[in-house]
Amino acid sequence: MPMEQQGVNWIRFLRKYGPIPRNDNMYDEAIHRSALRAKLRPLIFEHPAQNEVLACFEPGSRPTSVILTGAAGDGKTHLCRQVWHKITDINALDEPYVSTEIQYAGTDTITLHVIKDLSEWAPQPGARWEHEKEELLHRFCDSLYETEPKEIFLIAANDGQLIDSWRFLSDTDSVVRTRRLFENLLVENLSSQEGAALKFFNLSRGDSADLLERALDALISHEGWQKCYQESPGEFDAFGPRCPIRRNYELLQTPLVRKRLRELFQLCDFNELHIPIRQILLLLSNAILGHSRAKDRLMVSKDVPNIIRGRTVAKASLYNNIFGGNLSETRRDGITVFDYLNRFRIGYETSNRIDNILIFGEADEDLRSYFEQLLAGDEFYGADESYYAAQRNYVEGADENESSSQEFLDMLVSQRRGLFFKILPDQEEDLHLWELTVFKYAGEYLDRVVNVLRQDASVEHPILARIVRGLNRIFIGMLVANDRELFLATSLSFSNARVSRMLEDSIPVRRRGHERVELILKGGVPALNVVLTDSISCSMELHLVRYEFLSRVAEGALPNSFSRECYEDMLAFKSQLLARLADRQRLYEVDKEQSVLTFRLLNLDDMGNPTEELVEVTR
């Protein structure tokens, strides 16, 4: 292709990763066909599971079948192609089912069957299995329990499709056994089980933040960008100095933008919201090319001159595009990554200080330096002519002109999103960065809990004490101020009553013998661990929502007003703790009938500290 067209074609190709209509079942194949036509290298990076998957098919390894499961877009087809290329030296993998011979050391030739997409190969819901296909899956089930299998399988399937397909297979002993095997591996998050020649990779358990870093590196380093720079000599040209595509690309390279974006992905992981590779690439494409007035809301090179001359560059803001702000509400809500990121409510959450900077900062001597740095200093997405005009109309005549007011309120959403990515690390505390999200404790959670625990250090005591105070208020149902002990109380009716005053026991936060309350890492996730003896303990995963919930309750929020689900989780944890407490009591139980029963009733003094009242009942 002519030199002057390579950059243009790269932008057009990058657009195909974005939120445009496509057949998702053929996504991987469509991207590779487009790359071949454009004579461009697709966005490829090493999948975190790649080496482990390929190792299963090394000549010196033990023959074993492999299941790749997870959400759509987790890289299953890509990994199947990598395996196929390793064994056959063929890059393409167009058919839903292929097979070949593979030689393992010390064995005869073994047949490898590859089903790259079970949903494409299996019958549609309600239809019957074709005999040949059902018979092949029966052979797969049999092979898992053979000492020396003559054939092995590589099967890729979404987790729901995997379970459904086996549910509709006709029952044999090996099918029933394999069905239970899949369910156990999924529920317990295991990669194998003794007695079955199977490696199980649940790609949805992967680290979304790690995938983001790999995708960003692949995107930023792609050689297509160099062609763009070479083809943009003019001020109004695509990828010239005033081009929003170029600006967005360069912003994605800045350490601060990458850091904040990575933190959001980490927090999604800690909220049990996994973001697949396909969704990450969609986000990055939209971040660079998004514009609310372009076709399909994504720019191509020919759009740029008109956008610059029409003074609508601000509508291409990377900060807004990251949250799908360029898309229609219907389209945005239907895309997983935007659904997850918008749960942080960035753009809609704010503080008086932040909004004073945005609205009055230019005229306020105390806030002017922030306004100049964060808004006036941003020539692309900061305070431009349209912002100043809307701001003036809002301040001077908001009550008279409702449409002008709404225009400025919409701009504030975009500007708050921009501030989230522009506030410097040393300004975070002063400007309360995380109050721009619905999780105001999120920064503390990452920096002072997750990162500390990953370094095998102890979380500082005031944080643990706050979590315990929040739990006490839920467990007892009163505004307890004590954070030195965790109180386990019940009511006369049942353990999960809203107010519980019958004290069963209290566990000190600081170690006393074997007893203690601590924050630990459990499966890579922070957890609150209550230790009763050297052999009896109980823990609860403390993902971001639960951490925020307990911290808010400790501040005085009503337990059932923030999150009903979290409230129920805490009561379930209390029930588990009471069960472990009963286990400890049985362990040290003295075989002696007591003539007097003693009950400990909890009350609160004026400072919110629990006091005990002993009530004795003679049998």
Image: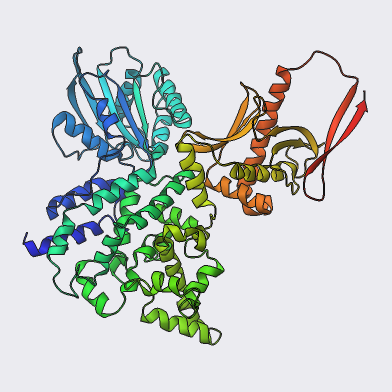
Q: In the rendered view of the protein, which quadrant contains the N terminus? A: bottom left
Residue 607's x, y, as percent? Answer: 78, 50
The foreground one among 358 and 83 is 358
Residue 129's x, y, as percent? Answer: 34, 32
Residue occupying the point 47% across, 29% down: 188
Q: Is residue 403 visible to the viewer in this orientation of the structure?
A: no
Judged left or right of residue 511, residue 373 is left
The image quadrant that residue 17 belongs to is bottom left
Judged left or right of residue 387, residue 97 is left
The foreground one among 610 and 494 is 610
Question: Vertically, is 558 above or below 82?
Answer: below
Judged left or right of residue 71, residue 26 is left
Judged left or right of residue 245, residue 519 is right
The image quadrant that residue 72 belongs to is top left
The foreground one among 531 and 368 is 368
Question: Vertically, is 393 above or below 190?
Answer: below
Residue occupying the point 43% across, 47% down: 266
Q: In the rendered view of the protein, which quadrant contains the C terminus? A: top right
Question: Vertically, is 389 above or below 18?
Answer: below
